[in-house]
Amino acid sequence: MTAKRWTLTDYASRTHVDVIKLSQRELGTAALDCTVGKRTLRGGLSEGVEIVEVDNGTCQFTILPTRGLSIWKAQIETLPLGWNSPILGPVHPDFVPQEEASGLGFLDGFDELLVRCGLLSNGAPEFDESGQLLYPLHGRVSNRPAHRLEVMCDAETGEITIEGEVDDRRFHCWNLRLSSQLRTRPGERGFRIVDCITNLSARPICAQLLYHVNFGKPLLQEGSQVVTPFQRVVPRDARAAEDIATWDTYQAPREAYSEQCYFCRLTADQHDMTQAMLRNAAGDRGLSMHWNITQLPYFTVWKNTVAEEDGYVTGLEPATNFPNQRSFEETQGRVLQLPPRGSAIFELRLEGHLDATQVDRAAEQISILQENTKPEVLCNPRPEWCGTSSETD
């Protein structure tokens, strides 16, 4: 592969590019008018947040190197993706109190389309016997800046890759690195993520990773549906059990709504690939996520259909585990075992569906994955799946 390469940030060589705009001519993508740009936001809680904006001619998305290489928002032709959080973001990590005693500081910066949770823990906050915070909600990686960031473009295929590294470290405790590639090709109706978690330590460690992929209007609305090839669905707690009969459909915004979570195991094809889709009420717009269940074997549906002012949103969340407290997941064997200098790969693809034909085709693909399965929807939480914490997702 012959690739052009631009280094935007490299801590090792003290390289940093504040502003850049790469055009179709510079990228060499002859097929469509593709661009990549980098700039820094100013004002409010976004002060100092660096963003990378990628346009492949069909899909535009914004990467946040300052926030763990999260993806803030995207648009595929006329379909906007993301949600309207009450947080005025993207929020610089300096304004996110990750070590706050409640363990909920993560929520002060939560407004992305796609945010990674981990790397040491990815679920509910956890405390020791004296009440001291052990693990904050959803971990720390989403509030760590990238120390390396590059743009690459394949001269033959036109594929654009944004590659970065983010470290989650504490002296004497853990030393983990996220190496990520966000890839897209001219005209692609979405993008792909290839992540690698590496244990840089000489000691073994247990890690976790969850992709918190969040959608609001217009894709989320009354009558929207999440379509999955599920083997089993379990309500996280008594609150989720109240609406287990409608776990896969959505209500209109409701002021008094209290969040609900459903834990799932999905089926896959002969290559261990699975797919989940969120489609609108009319069935003429949708978004599919594709991943390998040997890498990400667990899936959570988070429903938070509160009033629009309070953050009307759902999360589709493939992960290495369920988002319970880390110690509970460890007792159930749902943690990633990384030997000294060992690593693990994770791949996720997002694909937009822009008409009824595309939505129906995706639904049929999912149906085929499930055709040899007798799916179960359990009415109550399962003790081996559901921890005791009732903290917010």
Image: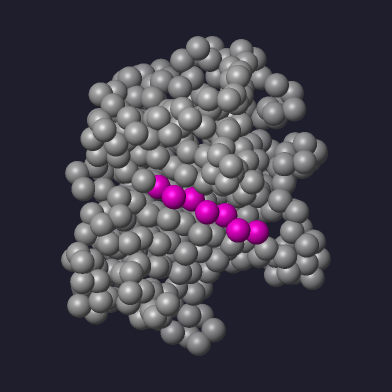
Residue 148 is situated, as x and y percent measured from the top left of the image, at 49, 74
The correct choice, above or below, for 43 with respect to 216 in the image is below
The correct choice, above or below, for 158 with respect to 124 in the image is below
Query: Which quadrant of the figure contains the C terminus?
Result: top right
The quarter of the picture where residue 150 lies is bottom left
Residue 215 is situated, as x and y percent measured from the top left of the image, at 37, 37
Residue 143 is situated, as x and y percent measured from the top left of the image, at 51, 57
Residue 268 belongs to magenta span: no
Q: Nearer the viewer, residue 194 or 62?
A: 194
The quarter of the picture where residue 315 lies is top left
Asked whether the viewer can see residue 48, the reply is no
Residue 50 is situated, as x and y percent measured from the top left of the image, at 36, 66
Which residue occupies the extreme bottom position in the image? 13
Residue at screen point 77% across, 36% down: 332
Q: Nearer the viewer, residue 281 or 353?
A: 353
Residue 110 lies left or right of residue 127; in this view the side is left
**Main secondary structure of the magenta stretch:** strand
Residue at screen point 49% across, 19% down: 247
Residue 347 belongs to magenta span: yes
The correct choice, above or below, for 193 with respect to 106 in the image is below
Residue 100 lies left or right of residue 361; in this view the side is right
Q: What residue range appears in magenta? A: 344-350
Q: Nearer the viewer, residue 388 or 176?
A: 176
